[in-house]
Image: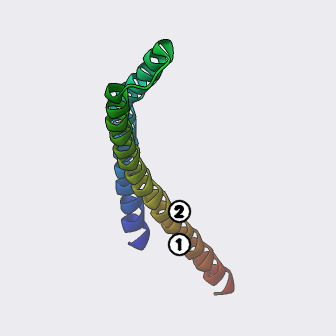
Amino acid sequence: MALVSADSRIAELLTELHQLIKQTQEERSRSEHNLVNIQKTHERMQTENKISPYYRTKLRGLYTTAKADAEAECNILRKALDKIAEIKSLLEERRIGEWERTCWEVLC
């Protein structure tokens, strides 16, 4: 009975992990646009050879957004790592349980 519930829990966790991976990819796609804007702004600044208040303000906003995007992606990745750790733990518990049952069968 415990194996069935562990197997179903592992399947649940794998589904959740898959969703988190998809969320990570979506978050990366969203933040990519901002990173391209940062790069283009830097290129425009280099062609003008000066840092105007406009570009300084624009870059500050772009970097703030990029930082928020990175933090959001980081949070999703942490959740995914937690799911992976939980899956590993369940697999280890299952392996130990199977080993103990095998030992008892040999001894009895």
How far apart marks 1 and 2 lie (CA) works out to: 9 Å
Callout 2, which amino acid? Lys
Measured as percent of width and height from the top left, residue 14 is found at 41, 51
Q: Earlier in the sequence, mark 1 or mark 2?
A: 2
Name the residue nearer the viewer: 9 or 60. 60
33 vs 87: above or below: above
Task: Identify the residue shown where x is 44% and y is 56%.
Answer: 78
Name the residue nearer the viewer: 11 or 30. 30
- Which residue occupies the extreme bottom position in the image? 108
Q: Is residue 22 left or right of residue 105?
A: left
Task: Tell me the colour scheme of the image.
Answer: rainbow
Quadrant of the rendered image containing residue 104: bottom right
Name the residue nearer the viewer: 100 or 26. 26
Residue designated by label 1 = 93
Q: Are circles 1 and 2 on residues that touch, CB within 8 Å?
A: no
Measured as percent of width and height from the top left, residue 36 is found at 41, 23
Looking at the rendered image, the disc whose residue lies closer to the viewer, 1 or 2, is 2
Measured as percent of width and height from the top left, residue 101 is found at 58, 78
Callout 1, which amino acid? Glu
37 vs 106: above or below: above
Residue designated by label 2 = 88
Number of numbered markers? 2
Q: Residues within 10 Å of mark 2 (few under 14, many from 20)?
A: few
26 vs 73: above or below: above
Could one spot residue 104 in this view of the protein?
yes
Measured as percent of width and height from the top left, residue 52 is found at 38, 25
Task: Identify the residue shown where x is 43% and y is 18%.
Answer: 40
**Helix, strand or loop at mark 1:** helix
The quarter of the picture where the N terminus appears is bottom left
**Helix, strand or loop at mark 2:** helix
